[in-house]
Amino acid sequence: MKIRIDDLHGDEIRALLEEHLQDMYANSPAESVHALDLEALRDPRITFWTIWDENQLAGCIALKQLDTLHAEIKSMRTPRNLRRRGAARQLLQHLIDEARQRNYSRLSLETGSIKFFEPARDLYRSFGFEYCEPFADYAEDPNSVFMSKVIVSIVPIIPISSTSL
């Protein structure tokens, strides 16, 4: 599978994001849906990736910069008919690696609290995310859970020779 930055103009991504929004509204009250539509995902603070299995869209994920040290995962989704093939794990690892390269110290997310969202919560926990308090502009909501992970940046170590001391 191949991951690439997406410009959000293809028919496949429009359909996947529509499926995502339909599921969010079908499983959460409207005031608890924090999924972004196409226009909101075009915010310059957001980087959006898709993963492709040959010519078939297998999923998407977005990274929203909240500040210079903190980012949020948005719009993580795999199509219903392509789940359990590893696309979500690859996307999440890609996003974590990107967060490290950008020197974020914290990566956070909001997801649903009901059983429908349990596979997503399990995936995030398997990557070391822990439950936390609401962050950014979120407020306590019985239909939402918040998770966060401390990111350790990859900083190159430059050896200092004894002659330069």
Image (cartoon, rainbow, N blue to C red):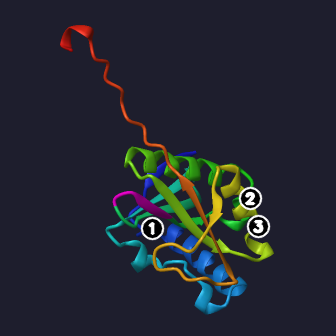
Residue nearest the viewer, comparing 136 with 17: 136
**Where in the figure is residue 30, as x and y percent of width and height?**
61, 91
Element at badge 2? helix
Residue nearest the viewer, comparing 16 with 111: 111
Q: Which quarter shows the C terminus?
A: top left
Q: Is residue 74 magenta?
A: no
Quarter residue 66 falls in: bottom left
For label 3, the crowd category at 10 Å Cα-Cα, with few meaning under 14, some 14 to 19 and many 20 or more, is few
Contact? badges 3 and 2 (CB < 8 Å): yes
**Where in the figure is residue 143, as x and y percent of width and height?**
69, 82
Q: Earlier in the sequence, mark 1 or mark 2?
A: 1
Name the residue rendered at 46%, 74% in the picture: 136
The span from disc 1 to disc 2 (Cα, nearest Å) is: 30 Å
Badge 3 amino acid: Glu
| Disc number lying in front (1 or 2) | 2
Name the residue rendered at 57%, 60% in the picture: 148
Name of the residue lying farthest toward the front: 165
71 left or right, relative to 80: left
**Where in the figure is residue 134, as x and y percent of width and height?**
56, 74
Badge 1 amino acid: Gly
Badge 2 amino acid: Asp
Element at badge 1? loop
* Magenta stretch bounds: 68-72
Judging by the rendered image, the residue that carries numbered circle 3 is 118
Main SS category, magenta section? strand
Q: Is residue 70 magenta?
A: yes
Residue nearest the viewer, comparing 163 with 127: 163
Judging by the rendered image, the residue that carries numbered circle 1 is 10
Judging by the rendered image, the residue that carries numbered circle 2 is 122
Residue 55 at least partly seen: no
